[in-house]
Image (spheres, rainbow, N blue to C red):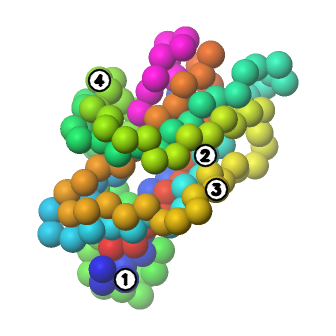
């Protein structure tokens, strides 16, 4: 890895459009020629009810792209002094779910949060060249969510 640091973030999106449905809200794909190390994942919600059930959040390995929005969604460099271009790609808001093979992390997060809840990853997640990772959520009602994923190429 050449030590290019990037970040994907989405300030607001609807996590789950249908009640009790699973939705991939974010997916990233490592470049075909190099791996990626994911070193931080954060999620937060804009819930208003203190009685709403927690949102089930999962970090998953995926083998297909599904149908997601990619237009205008590119990673941001965390180190503006590096001149090379980040090659990792991202997409958000699945309308057709990607194929998921492994759940790498699973956590329940209360939807009425005013600050970001960071998923407590004990180790960085390493993606092989061309491999995909997603953030999936299941909520009992539609709710706004935001997320941040920091990575290194």
Q: Position of residue 29 (x, y in %)?
A: 28, 53
Q: Residues within 10 Å of mark 3 (few under 14, many from 20)?
A: few
Residue at the (19%, 57%) spot, across then down: 130
Q: Is residue 61 above or below residue 140?
A: below
- Dot label at residue 96: 4
User: Helix, strand or loop at disc 1?
Assistant: loop
User: Helix, strand or loop at disc 3?
Assistant: loop
Between the C-alphas of marks 4 and 1, the distance is: 33 Å
Between the C-alphas of marks 3 and 2, the distance is: 11 Å
Between the C-alphas of marks 1 and 2, the distance is: 24 Å
Residue 95 lies in what quarter of the image?
A: top left
Q: Residues within 10 Å of mark 1 (few under 14, many from 20)?
A: few
Q: Is residue 7 left or right of residue 47?
A: left
Q: Which residues are magenta?
A: 16-25
Q: Residue farthest to the left?
A: 33
Residue named by callout 2: 43
Between the C-alphas of marks 3 and 1, the distance is: 23 Å
Residue named by callout 1: 3
Residue named by callout 3: 120
Q: Is residue 59 above or below residue 111?
A: below
| Residue 110 visible here | yes
Sequence-first tag of 2 and 4: 2
Q: Nearer the viewer, mark 3 or mark 1?
A: 3
Q: Is residue 99 above or below residue 91?
A: above
Residue at the (29%, 50%) spot, across then down: 132
């Amino acid at each position: 890895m050449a030590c290019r640091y990037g970040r994907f973030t989405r300030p607001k999106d609807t996590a789950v459009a249908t009640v009790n449905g699973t939705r991939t809200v974010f997916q990233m794909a490592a470049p075909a020629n190099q791996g990626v190390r994911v070193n931080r994942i954060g999620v937060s919600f804009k819930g208003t009810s203190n009685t709403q059930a927690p949102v089930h959040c999962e970090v998953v390995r995926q083998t297909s792209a599904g149908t997601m929005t990619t237009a205008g969604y590119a990673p941001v460099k965390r180190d503006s002094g590096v001149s090379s271009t980040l090659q990792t790609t991202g997409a958000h808001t699945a309308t057709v779910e990607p194929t998921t093979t492994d759940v790498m992390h699973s956590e329940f997060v209360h939807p009425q949060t005013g600050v970001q809840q960071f998923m407590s990853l004990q180790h960085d997640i390493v993606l092989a060249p061309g491999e995909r990772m997603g953030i999936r959520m299941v909520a009992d009602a539609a709710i706004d969510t935001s997320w941040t994923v920091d990575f290194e190429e």
